[in-house]
Image (cartoon, helix red, strand yellow):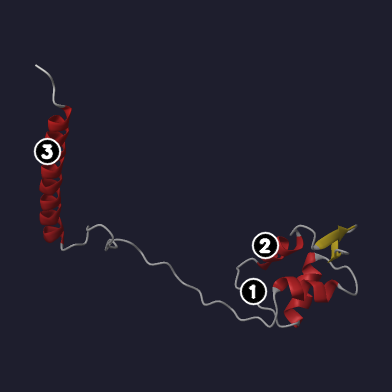
Amino acid sequence: MKRDTLKEYKSLRNALHREKEALEARLHEVNAVLGDAGAPGKVSAGKTKRKVRKRLKNPMSLSTAVVKVTSDKALTKQEILAEVGKLGYKFAASNPVNSLNATLYAKGKFKKTQGGKFSPAKK
């Protein structure tokens, strides 16, 4: 007897659809009991909210402020932080040196001289 692959395919496909409908019905029952807290796309009640900090408004970017304070003479990181603060720049980070490091070591923006002092890179 010859196999009819088309009939087999239709039979398997129909069986999968029936199984899917049964699983969806069961999931609907579970969600109803849970009050939809566990439904896909819903946020679980047990999740904690992240603390959102308001972004500080600075008169200029940190990079611009560092260029401004180091344009006359090379300064150390601590001197740069002090001078940038005098310009009115405020850091939101708990450790401002990390933000300053990211700015100072950005490729090609600043050069480090002897004594750990930084100045704008020549272009």
- Label 3 to label 2, Cα distance in Å? 60 Å
Task: Kindly indicate the quadrant of the structure image that contains residue 62.
Answer: bottom right
Q: Amino acid at mark 3?
A: Ala
**Residue shown at 59%/79% (left/top)?**
56
Residue designated by label 2:
98
Q: Is residue 116 visible?
A: no
Q: Percent position (x, y) of residue 48?
A: 35, 64
Q: Is residue 48 above or below residue 27?
A: below
Q: Percent position (x, y) of residue 116?
A: 85, 59
Residue designated by label 1:
91
Element carrying mark 2 = helix
Compared across the picture, whether 123 is left or right of 84 comes to right
Q: Percent position (x, y) of residue 99?
A: 67, 65
Q: Give residue 15's mark.
A: 3
Q: Amino acid at mark 2?
A: Asn
Point out the residue furthest to the top here. Answer: 1
